[in-house]
Image (tube, rainbow, N blue to C red):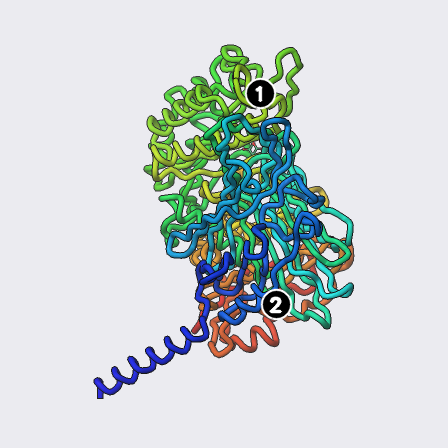
Amino acid sequence: MALSRAIFFVVTWITTTLIRGCLGKLDVGIHKHHSLDTWFLVTEKSSYVISAAANGYVVNMHWGKRLTHLDDLNATVTEPPIWSQVISVTEAREEVPAFGGLRYRENILKAELPKGIRELNLQYAGNATISDHSRKLDLDLRDGNRTEFLVTLHYELDIENDIIRRSYTVYNGLDKRVNLSKASSAAWHLPYALGWDEQRELTTLAGEWSQEAMVETTRLAPGVKHTVESTRGMSDHVSHPYFALSQVPNAVNPSTDVYFGALAWTGSWEITVHTDTKGYVRVTGGIHHQDFGWTLEPGESFTTPIFAAGYTDEGLPGARKRMPRHARKYQKRNLATQKDDDVFHPVLYNSWEAVTFDLSFEKQMALADKAAPLGIELFVVDDGWFGIDSPRDNDTLGLGDWDTNPKKFPNGFKPLADHVHELGMKFGLWFEGEMVNPNSDLYREHPEWVFHYDGIPEYLSRTQLVLNFGLKEVRDHIFEKVAGHIEEAGIDYIKWDFNRPMQGVTMHDYDRNPQEAWVLAVEGYYEIIARLKERFPNLWFESCSSGGGRMDLGALERTDQVWTSDNTRPDARLFIQYGASLWIPPRMKYGWVTDSSSDNRFEIPLSFRFHVSFMGGLGLGSNINEFSKEQLEKTTHWITLYKKIRHVIQNGDLDWLVPPSRVSELIAVTESIYNEGEEAVVLAFRHNSPFPATGDLSPIRLRSLDQDATYRVTIWQEDPTEPEDEYEMSGALLMYRGLELPGLNNGMFKSAVVWLQQA
Ligand code: GLA
């Protein structure tokens, strides 16, 4: 019996394999066509096809739904592009449209070659390498085969998330120097629209300090180029390097195809989106070209940062699932601290909002004593602990002097850190290593270490200046200071801040292009993180920049978590978290419960504040010294509940069933889905409204559950100790009829946490 079953399986396997072979089924991974210079980049649900088969220009042939068979492949390649320099190459969907020739759309590479030539004509050089188990592809392009100017395109597949990571390396094989004045990372080409009716909507993020990641949508219009950017030397709050382009459903194309992408660069950046009357859309992005410059001496090369982009036919929720998963995947890959999904992001306490610069050993000891019994797992000392001659009593003093202030902490941090450890918590400390106040010993000793132009005034912002992290001696000095504290006190975690934009960015006494400073500064920041992580593999690193000014993909892949915003008012936070969830993994996005949640018109309940902060990593920033006994008790219970459900929140996908709206009924609902719908957590909010909030809330239709499973539904509202309701319900009913939350009817600042577990 067993033998006949085995024979049956072997025969079936052989037959299936043969049939597949005949049809030439394209598996996931990167494949080259057997005879043509055409490559198929296949992910779970998408295909990306590039070809140099027609005339040597490397062009995109397809990006979208997955092609599955060789016959698809042949159909694609029998339609070669006929572009040439004569029939304007500007129409071509070139992978690297460079400046030069008859190219008049957005280009991504501009180089000055010897003899003043600033024109490139890049064509396939006949060399391609597929590696890393068919996940990576490198393609060489040469400048019209005329010169030794080589561009190697890099592609890397994130197969499960339908994302492709792109960058390229420019190599100067000439015997003279070459200057780059633009080196964006990639050009992405969307399929042509089918007629005028087919429209696309662009989703981008706008913002400012305390108002990060505001979602904006714009219809693409022919002839209009959209740009989102930061020119400030950091990825910044004014926008965030992310885009999504959604197909507006219509009769011709009823599906909501979405193309989305994010840049992994923590410096100045730009993303442009342009469409024309034929419905062709090009997206470009990379380092901002405004003051970019890089010199390549003979034999030198320059590699651009990664621009990752993907395709989904599951609409914006599909994009919101994929990009955070992608960031998490690379974070796990890069950081020893993040390898294990069961090591959860700790519940932290940080007294910055409660006491600002008013720090002392005694006060922090007392706060630690109060924090531990609440269930806090990480105790962080923020700004204000350093400076000897210029003690950091406010933000005009001491930045750069990373010595413990002897009046505030007479014996350094060891006694406090030891105490915190004895209480069972981890210990964290704040640094802003790339900055200096003019009123500091460091600036008095090394005024030449800050970014400045000789003879031009230095422009202060938050009374501080930016150190030139392009200089090794600066990085070494700061690294030794930070590492010294970590070693001496046994610090587990650092919060690394960056509180002003750059200016005066240049390199002095440098025989190369001084504009390189923009890139060197960012690489210096990356180097410090890498060195710290190497010396202290268990160290956790938080990326902060006046709130959420440094939470691009580049920061996400190198750090443990990000501080999303200095605005901790929970109703504002809903909007910020909505935008940030487009690309940031839930566990990396911290939210603090603070006291900044009331003004003189209303008080936002503690339950609402906790529920908003439950959406990612949980923090507490309130002045717990002033908490009543009841508030302390409730805080303990909310933290206990959070710990019970955080595996769902931190490891699940965050979906927004109802996005927060500024115009209609002020409701917002999220659903964290864990392990294919085995469990879920719903957070529902009825927030502030100028209108009487009298209506009943309609049932909320959940998503991504198992329709055949029965779920245990537990609902908490204001009391963390006593569920408001508990019952069992089928996945089908929860998804197709909806979850009723009558407790949110009639009122403002009402909220609920709902835990769904398959019974
Ligand atoms: C920035 C951060 C805050 C806090 C202060 C300290 O604004 O975003 O969380 O650390 O700096 O000066």
Residue 47 rendering spot, x and y as whole percentages? 53, 62
Q: CA distance from mark 1 to mark 2?
A: 55 Å
Residue 654 rendering spot, x and y as whole percentages? 54, 58
Q: Amino acid at mark 2?
A: Leu
Q: Quadrant of residue 406?
A: top left
Query: Secondary structure under badge 1?
Result: loop
In this orientation, which residue lies closer to the viewer: 125 or 691?
A: 125
Image check: 454 left or right of 429?
A: right
Quadrant where ligand 1 appears: top right
Q: Which residue is mark 1?
A: 451
Q: Is residue 32 above or below residue 389?
A: below
Q: Earlier in the sequence, mark 1 or mark 2?
A: 1
Residue drawn where x is 45% and y is 43% of the image:
560
In this orientation, which residue lies closer to the viewer: 536 or 572?
A: 536
Query: Secondary structure under badge 2?
Result: loop
Q: Nearer the viewer, mark 1 or mark 2?
A: 1
Q: Which residue is mark 2?
A: 741
What quarter of the picture does the N terminus occupy?
Answer: bottom left
Q: Is residue 95 above or below residue 48?
A: above
Instruction: Please indicate, yes or no, whether residue 89 appears anywhere in the rendered image.
Output: yes
Q: Quadrant of residue 450?
A: top right
In this orientation, which residue lies closer to the viewer: 714 or 463?
A: 463
Residue drawn where x is 60% and y is 23% of the image:
505
Q: Amino acid at mark 1?
A: Phe
Kindly check if marks 1 and 2 are in contact, taking CB atoms under 8 A apart as contact.
no
Q: Residue furthest bottom?
A: 1
Residue 118 rendering spot, x and y as whole percentages? 64, 33
Instruction: Please indicate, yes or no, whether residue 432 appears anywhere in the rendered image.
Output: no
Residue drawn where x is 55% and y is 38% of the image:
146
What quarter of the picture does the C terminus occupy?
Answer: bottom left
Residue drawn where x is 50% and y is 67% of the image:
714
Residue 359 rendering spot, x and y as whole percentages? 49, 26
